[in-house]
Image (cartoon, rainbow, N blue to C red):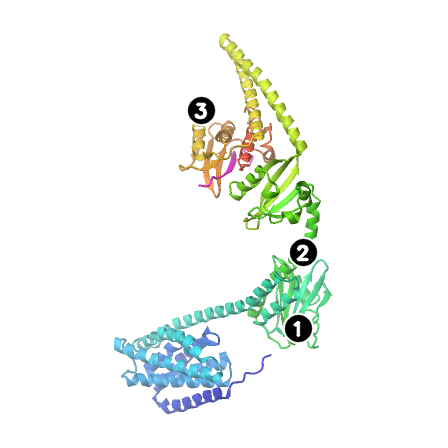
Amino acid sequence: MMSAQRFPRPFQLFCWSLAGGATVALLSVSHQVPLTAIPLLALVFVPATWALHSLSFRIHRGIYHSFEGPICLACSLLFGPAAAAWVAALGAALNEIVMRRRGAPFVARSWGMFALIWLAGGYAYQAIGGEVPLTRLEALELGRAFFLAFVVAVLNRLVMTLSHRLQGLPALDYLTRTAPRTFLIEMAVMPSGAAMAVAHVYTGPLALTLLILPLLIVGFLAQRLGQAQETLERQVAALDALSRAGMFIGSSQELRPILDLIREGIGQLIDTSNFWVAIYEPEQQELIYEVIYDEGVRYPSVRRPYRPGEGVAAWIIEHRRPLLLHTLEEIQSLGIVLPTGGSGKMAESLLGVPMMVKGKVVGAICTQSYTPFAFTEEDQELLMALANQAAVALENARLFREIERNREYLRTVLDSVDHAIVVTSLDGRVRLVNRAMEVLFGVSEQEAIGRPLTEIVPHASVSEAIQHLMNGESTREETTEIELSDGRVLVAHLTPVTDDRGERIGYVTTMADVSALHQLSELKSRMIRIASHDLRNPLHLAKGFFEVLVEDLKLAGHQEQLASRVMKNLQAMERLIDNLLELERIEATRIARDTPVDMSELVREVVQEHRFRAEMKRLRLWTDIPEEPLLVKGDRHLLTQVVVNLLDNAIKYTPSGGEIWVRLWLEGDEVILTVQDTGIGIPKEAQPYLFEQFYRVHQPGAEKVAGTGLGLSLVQAVVREHGGRVWVESEGVPGKGSLFGVALPAMKQ
């Protein structure tokens, strides 16, 4: 509990002198108050003045302002200085007694100051010819009323400046910073007081009352705004200490200094002389009381088993919500076992909140008092906000220690992998290598750290892959082969590493020895080339001879159908061999990526070539292709085959009367192509296998559609070689069709 306020003797003498002088002055001029005005003064003016005083809002630390001035001005302009002085003094004194409760000297100061300044202002107004009551708002009358308000405002600031000086507060700061702001605010609303006076003269008390309501509303809103500002300033003051705790984390793994800084921050808002922080360890089912204070004395930390429902910390952690108890009876009614502190006293009130981060409770903070009703709901909200910040600091410190413990484990895992692994920064410099990398290239981690990867692995293909990634030409993964001097072949995968926001922070390169697979692949390629060439020539001759026979012979109707089937099968075999050779060419050679290809022009050409075929099948072919060029780097012939295969499939698998949409657009750093149809669709279970070689979907409507099962394999191979991606979307419902999409890295302009 705070001790009673003590005021400097000069300040008390000043306050009581003001009150005494004002009382004598009021009694001497009370006869000037019209008797007929007393009911209106008592029922309207004094309550309104008191209400506006109670709606005061903070201007500066310890300085408040209110909008009672226009009410007092209206009273002075209607009934004279004496009536205004009584109203102002009573309203201010009642506010100090009932609302502010700062002590008798402040009551005396408010009574005396407001009575004297309104007497002085009212008589100054009459001295320059001001009329009472005010009956019109012409320029001269309004100027005199404004003069009255000006005198009152100036005297008020002078008295307050002297009051600050006698209290030992910074009077010059008030006079130069706070007083000008409150003066301008007060003078801005004073004209409404003159309007109230004239309205009362012509229309009576009802109009006066209606004009007072807007002032009450403005005062209420200003008070709420001031409270919000004060709350925000308090939070900022506390968070400043917590931010220092966060900065401390980077230089220390110890929790206790961080918790001390947290207590320091909370102590700027709430009394923390009786305060503790409990950290919850779910694995050990323990509560660690790292910080314990009782009556300002710190006690050693203790460990206690965590038992749900036993103790304040366990209750808060179990229920995951704040606990605000105002009296000992409330504490006992909740059934919480509350042990006494080091002082041996029983807490009369307490405020506890959970420390939560990412939905997980990491502990509890509690502050106690030996007096009832020591904490408010506002304290609870602020402590909850600070506890969440504290939870982040504690979790970060915990993670810091866990990272240190896991470093050796990670090193063991990396060194146990047979593949060479190297991590590089954004500029390609080595940050980490594993043991396999050291053995493979004969360089230790200490020698490799900080050097460019191209120095450790001096191969042109690696340099080119790194350049593609760093220049943004490839956004995902680069794969390349490395041939070592001893004949071994490595496959290197270079992958960007991104953070939670998707921003690159480095690259990971893994290298595996694929010498055996490489030899097997070469054997397979050789066999495919030999078989394809050996088949292609006889097939070409057979097809030619068959065409000659068909032309020379006169075939009957059923013979002509059989000949047509033979020709279709010969053509299918020819396409199969061409596709196999094309796939082999793609896998065996590296596609030149330096040639710009305008995808807008390419797609338009392919669509135009297929439009007649679509119309013959009574299909509507729609396009959405931009006029401006959309450039990618790659092989135009192969990219044309991608579009041809996708559009050809859409036409083949869409029944007559259907629709096909071909769309092309730029999205981020990718050129997106989609081909959508209203065909027979693709079952969900078949979609993972669509891009495998020779795979064909067996479903109703697809039996009579010719194909080799290599078209989509070719599409995927070409797109991957261009650093892109391909996907399919289909509900597998006939009539809803399918959508095939291709994304290629856009060429930087």
In the image, 595 versus 347, the foreground residue is 595
| Residue of label 2 | 404
**Residue 471 in sight in this render:** yes
- Vertical placement of residue 87 versus 431, above or below: below
Q: Where is residue 405 in the image (x, y as percent from the top left)?
A: 69, 55
Ranked by sequence position, the earlier of labels 1 and 2 is: 1
Residue depicted at x 70% and y 52%: 408
**Residue 50 in sight in this render:** no
Q: Position of residue 202 (x, y in %)?
A: 29, 76
**Where the C terminus falls, by quadrant?**
top left
Residue depicted at x 69% and y 71%: 338
| Residue of label 1 | 293
Specify few, some or many for label 3: CA neighbours under 10 Å numbering under 14, 14-19, or 20 or more: few
Q: Residue flagged by tag 1: what amino acid is it?
A: Tyr
Residue depicted at x 61% and y 68%: 261
Q: Residue flagged by tag 2: what amino acid is it?
A: Glu
- Vertical placement of residue 293 versus 420, above or below: below
Dots 3 and 1: beta carbons under 8 Å?
A: no
| Residue of label 3 | 616
Q: Residue flagged by tag 3: what amino acid is it?
A: Met
Q: Distance between the residues labelled 1 and 2?
A: 31 Å
Secondary structure of residue under mark 2: helix
Which range of residues does the magenta coloring cover?
Answer: 731-749
